[in-house]
Amino acid sequence: MHFGLIIIGDEILSGKRQDKHLPKVIELLNARGLSLAWARYVGDDRERITQTLRDAMASGDAVFSCGGIGATPDDHTRQAAAAARGVPLVLHPQARELIVERMRDIAAEQGQPFEPDRADNVHRLNMGVFPEGAQIIPNPYNKIPGFSVGEVHFVPGFPVMAHPMIEGLLDGRYATLHGSHRTVEQSVIVFGAMEAALTPLMEAVECEFPGIKVFSLPSVDHPQWGRHIELGVKGPAAAVPLAYARLKAALLAEPIRLGPEMVR
């Protein structure tokens, strides 16, 4: 199974806020021997969000969607998820209980009586209106849950809430996948070569070693090595040494200079 990430919100695309989800999700996945296959950024446009979620639901991937699940006019994710799934929105009974519990806690903290029928409290229940058949995702920060529709999981845009919720899914629902994406990289710094000239070698190594990916990372102004290419292979630990040996042997036969070697 592959993992994907959707980040929703005009504030990210406009630059008002910096995205903290992408690096954190990569970190959480890597720590468990998993990896991120793709990521998408989407503004607060319901039709565009709906199409993005429709694609995610059809992908078969495990997808985390961050943002837009509140109950203000600029939050469209819940409605878009229902449209993408082709089901109505309904108040989830367990979500309702958790939201009421949260409102009761807030009233107690403020020393006020809990008034469930007050207009603002009734409106807060909209945060528990999910696509029919959704499952809730516990929120350890403030109890207001997210929800899952199949393998697509919806969490708030706030990192302090979203990241523990994603971590809970990884260590619960996807615990059996831990380590299944783990790969090894082996590379060398190459001086005096052009990517175009190295491409046939890269293609040959990938052809000879199924499951191995060859990568090329050029740099023109590296503070230590200046202009260079980091050329390497990545894949299953058992296959990488042989593929790298083939790559390096071919490089040594060329009129180029090799620098430091790295294993990650």
Image (spheres, grey):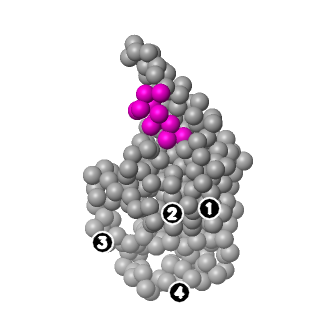
For this rendering, which residue is in front, 78 or 43? 78
Q: Which disc, if any, is residue 220?
A: 3
Q: Which residue is mark 1?
A: 86
Between disc 2 and disc 1, whose residue precedes? 2
What type is the residue that disc 3 sits on? Val
Q: Which mark is in front, 2 or 1?
A: 1
Q: Which residue is mark 2?
A: 50
Q: CA distance from mark 2 to mark 1?
A: 11 Å
Q: Which residue is mark 4?
A: 200
Q: Are marks 4 and 3 in contact (CB under 8 Å)?
A: no
Q: Which mark is in front, 3 or 1?
A: 1
What type is the residue that disc 1 sits on? Gly
What type is the residue that disc 2 sits on? Thr
Residue positioned 57% across, 82% down in the render: 203
- Residue 201 can be seen in this image: yes
Q: CA distance from mark 4 to mark 3?
A: 22 Å
Residue positioned 57% across, 50% down in the render: 89
Q: Which mark is in front, 2 or 4?
A: 2
